[in-house]
Amino acid sequence: MSAIFVVLILLIVVILVLSAWLNNASQREVQTQVTLSPQRAADVANTAFNTFTWKDVGGPGDINKRRRTMNDSGPVISIDVADLPSGGSNITVWMSAWTKKGPTIQGSDIVMRQRSKIIKRLEAEV
């Protein structure tokens, strides 16, 4: 067996493992609690999206945004904003729809970055 063949096989295995990790990580639901009112929290979450690259769509959340693509197959990020009894809001962010190409969810890295951006903006507003 040549060294190039072994390196190629190892590279394929690494790519498949990375793909599985990205798929799993992008499908996780993330929650945070902030002292903002539900309306203000929804406004802050909405401002985290660039209107050129994300568009409003229907979905299970209070806010649902699809990543714009040529064939409209981008992932959808959904956000629920719930009122807390003690005041403030509980925000849940998750990927509610996606397209797979082979073993990989298309745009999983974009979802992870956008989800992190939303949470950071909400927590910075406090």
Image: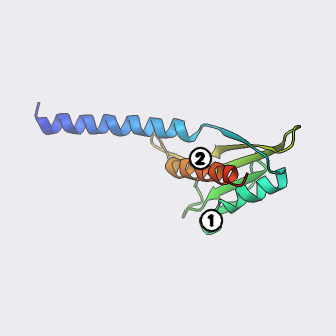
Q: Secondary structure at mark 2?
A: loop
Name the image quarter holding residue 72. bottom right
| Residue situated furthest bottom in the rendering | 52
Q: According to the image, label 2 marks what residue?
A: 98
68 vs 48, nearest the viewer: 48
Give, as a three-letter code, the residue at label 2: Trp
Element type where label 1 sits in the image:
loop
Say if 37 sits above or below 43 in the image: above
The answer to whether residue 106 shows anywhere in this view is: no
Residue 100 horizontal/vertical position (percent): 52, 44
Q: Are marks 2 and 1 in contact (CB under 8 Å)?
A: no
Q: Is residue 13 visible?
A: yes
Give the number of the mark in front: 2 or 1: 1
Q: Where is residue 33 shown, x and y percent of the image?
A: 74, 41
Relative placement, left or right, of 94 versus 100 is: right
Ranked by sequence position, the earlier of labels 2 and 1 is 1
Most extreme residue toward the top is 1
Q: Amino acid at mark 1?
A: Asn
The x, y position of residue 54, in whole percent, is 63, 62
Q: Residues within 10 Å of mark 2 (few under 14, many from 20)?
A: some
The answer to whether 28 appears left or right of 39 in the picture is left
- 38, above or below 4, in the image: below
Quadrant of res 32 = top right
Residue depicted at 61% across the width and 49% down the height: 115
**Residue that numbered label 1 is attached to:** 50
Of 48 and 18, which appears nearest the observer?
48
